[in-house]
Each structure stands twice: as C-alpha cells, then as structure tokens.
Amino acid sequence: MKIYQGKGVVGGIAIGRIVVLKENLAQNNPQSTLSSTEELDRFKVAKAQAIEEINALYQKALREVGEEEAMIFEVHSMMLEDLDFNEFIEGKITQGSNALEAISEAKEYFSTLFAQMDDEYMKERSADIVDIANRVLKILSGVKDREVLEPSIILADDLSPSQTLQMQRDNFLALVTRYGSMNSHTAILARTMGIPACIQMHFDESVDGEVAILDGESGRLYVNPSEEILEEFRAKREQIVKEQSQLQDYKGKPTITKEGKKIMLYANIGNLEDAKSALQNDAEGIGLFRSEFLYLQKSTYPTEQEQFEAYKEVLELMGERKVVIRTLDIGADKRIDYFDLDIEENPALGYRAIRICLDREEIFKTQLRALYRASVYGKLSVMFPMITSLWEIVEIKKILVDVREELEREGVEYADFELGVMIETPASALIAEDLAKEVDFFSIGTNDLTQYTLALDRQNPKLEKFLDPHHPALLKLFEMVVEAGHKNQCWVGICGELAGDLSMTQKLLKIGFDEFSVSPKSILGLRKTILSMQ
C-alpha cells in the first residue's frame, strides 16, 4: 500500500478505482496546405461550435450545481468572443500560421499575460484562457477527452469547470488535484456536490486504475490498501452515511439554544433552483439572495420586468419565510462586460457594489423598482453591500423615496420592506451604532470582512496559513456589531464561510447572533450542532 498526503477540503470517505485525467491536447499541423482564408474559416466554424458547447454547459451547470457555479461559462463565452483574442488569432493566420498554431500561440500569450497580473481575480482568468483555447483546439483536431465510464476517484493536475460538467456526475466518487486552493473550482464543486476532495496532492500517474481509498478529512489517499484497511474505511463510510441520514430527523425542529433563544437558520442562494434546495433542507428563510447573478447571466442590463419576475418567483416559493435580497454587488471578483468597468490595480478596494449603484443611479433605481413591486408577493428584506459610511445610507434612503413616489404617481402596486446593511468592512463595523439607527438589520459578510480586517487575499493559496477565522480582531468586530444592533432593535445575522464553520458555532452563539445564513446543504448539520449544545 502507498499513501499520498494532500490537503483535505471536503470530508468523507470514497472507495473505488482511480482515474487519472490528463489534458489530451491537440497537436499542431505545420504541414497544412490550406490557404489563410480556409484556415480562418476553420477557426470561425470551430469557435462557433465551441460557443454552442459552452452554452450547453451553462444550462447543464444551472440544473446540476446552481447559478454561482454556472456563471464561469458565461465568462468563457465572453472571453471566446473577446476582440483582442480573436484579432490575435486572425492576425497570426493571415501571417501564415495555420489555425492550430495560431490558437496555441494565443493561448500561450494571453494565459501568460493574465498569470503575471497582480490582481488575483485577473490572475485566475489565465486558467480560463487555457480552457477555452483547448476546447477550440480539440474541435479542430477531433481530439476527445477521456471518458469516465464508472464511479471513480478522479485525479488530475487541476480540473476545469468544463471538464467536470462534461462528465457524468454519478461517476465522481471523489476529486483530487495536484494544485488548487480552498477556493478553487475543484473545492467549490466538491462542496456543492457533497463529495470528498483533496488539493495539493503530489501523486504518481502510475496509480491510474488502482483501487484506492480517499479520506477527505485527513487529506490522505491510500492506494492498493489491504482488505483489513478496506474494511476499516467501509465501516467509517457507513457511519458517515448513517449520520447524514439522521440529519433528516432535524427537519421541522425549531433551532433553540440551551438559554431558550430561537436562532433563525437561513440559506444563501443565487436563483430559484437554489431556493428550492433551501426548502428541501428546511431553511427558515433566505438570508442572502445574490441578485448580481441576474446581471451576470445577461449580455445586457436586465430589465425591471425581468428582475421583478425573478424576485417574485422566489418570494412566492418561500411563502411566509423571509427573503433577504442583496442589491447589486459587482466589481472586485465579479466583472460584467456591458458595465464597461475599468481594470483596476486593486479592485477589492475600488469601484464596486454600492459605489457603482450610487454613481449609476438609473441602474440602481431599476433594481429598487423591481424589488418594491415584488415585495407584494412575500416577506422581503433588502440589504446593501460594501457600506463604509452613514452618508451612503442617507443617499440610499433619498433614492428609495424617489422610487416610491414614482411608483405612486404611476399607480403601480408596491409594498415596503425591511432595510439592512451587509457589514463587510471594518468601517461599517466601527460605525455600527450610527448605522443601526437608520436600518432594521445587519448581516455580517464574513468573507470580505475577514479579508479587509486581516489584510489578506482569501483566494491566494500562499496566504492560507495566515487566515485565522478565530482572530480576536474579527471576534471583537462581531461583538461590536451585535451589541450596536441589539441596542437599537436591529436583528443581526452572519453569512459567509464562517457562518457554516461548526468549530465556530458556539463562539458565534455566545456573541449573540440571531440568524445564520449558510449553504442549503449545511442547514441541518448546523441545526444539529446547535441543539446538541443543550
């Protein structure tokens, strides 16, 4: 038996044969006798087919893993249509290269260009360039990816979104990659699917086809284990399955602490399908509806009616359960071509979220009109992201008055809603008492608040050892926000990765949070944890 050590990102036990996926790249054909015009035509036909495939993958991702995961294919489609990318390839073909050579050169040039950028989001686009270029290369040369025909433990250098979506989901027992971070595509996908996964594991490709055990908790891969070891892990796996089944017993139970406080367990969603999953997992409401996904999936600004219908669907589905919708939060790691945002050296500290909304008031008003109209159909609350000053709330309230007056003049039915602030900057945490006098609730966005407070990029794998969710500075900010909110009759929630971290649950309850908003699949486990503290 051989044991490989990696970094576990999703716990669980998988037992099966290993499939090592290698990138099956197309080879250049320098002997091509076609003219430049014919090579250009070949490229255009292959590109059109690639866009069709990407659009199909987007729809598949939407059905199987939800809006957030599907958005990467919108990015791929836009990148494949990018003017600079296309002009580079067409220029090379005109100069005498064949289509395969030209695309390979474009892949090398643009992936290197992105990889050298300081901004972490732009740096990650290097892998997307490689993915879309390889897709066109394979179409041109007729090369097919290896098929996974039976349930297997998948090993790869890294897994692109398109690789994983093209494979049959039932054949994923576990995912293992040589590279990647806690926030890589592989890690996010594994969490969504609820399967064991490890990253940063340096395995030998010779293990292909061997029987193995992956322990996602310890990050270990056992290749060719003895029957005794197999039996040990089969027993562990059965225990995990039993525990998952027992979680169903927690459906319908109120989440009450030993002190008698009722805790609301809400879900984070991006679309209607996510909302259905929230109900299946007994969410008591929606704590974060990321409205930017309505914008990310469009090639132009979504209309008021399109937004109204999307919000209305979710509100009607949730019935009497509260739905908290966050207003548009783009910029930083979420870019949309038609917004025509400048490339910034430090987008996390730049033109994003509420700053865009207050600057481009018509876009903001369109969303607010849709929200007011949809509020008639359910229990709506609206929160604003990236707040750093009281002035921003004052300006938002002026715009809200304008929108209500417009709707009244037009005779359009609407209903009011709760107002909240997403506390995700140290500035908003430090002035929480002033903000609490102006709104009805707070929701702490732990991902960004952690990043801004500790001055580190969460997506940079080199900084993972510095990321301490138990950092006393963060806990002090949490305490300040909860105290300020309760003092002014505001309820206070918490969302982001930390809300679902069961090792933090007891501390967060002690601080006094009223609501936890987590992924739908985390709700029952969190309820069990809280109730077991009796």
Image (cartoon, rainbow, N blue to C red):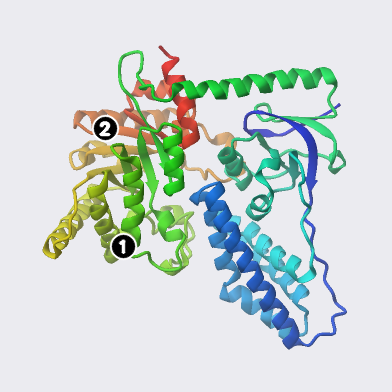
Badge 1: how crowded within 10 Å, few (<14), some, or many (20+)? some
Residue highlighted by disc 2: 491
On screen, 472 above or below 462?
A: above
Most foreground residue, 364 or 121: 364
Pair 2/1: label in front = 1
Q: Earlier in the sequence, mark 2 or mark 1?
A: 1
Query: Taking the image as drawn, is residue 135 in sight?
Result: yes
Q: Amino acid at mark 1?
A: Gln
Measure the C-alpha gap from mark 2 to mark 1. Answer: 31 Å
Q: Amino acid at mark 2?
A: Trp
Most foreground residue, 483 or 368: 368
Which residue is at 67% across, 30% downward? 216
Most foreground residue, 524 or 427: 524
Look at the numbered disc 2 and give the secondary structure of its residue.
strand
Classify residue 3 as left or right of residue 72.
Answer: right
Res 166 label: none
Res 305 label: 1
On screen, 160 above or below 342?
A: above
Among the 4 quarters of the image, the one containing residue 423: top left
Query: Taking the image as drawn, is residue 330 in sight?
Result: no
Classify residue 346 as left or right of residue 231.
Answer: left
Among the 4 quarters of the image, the one containing residue 432: top left
Q: Where in the figure is residue 340, as x and y percent of width and height?
A: 43, 69
Q: Where in the figure is residue 97, as x and y percent of width and height?
A: 77, 80
Most foreground residue, 311 or 450: 311
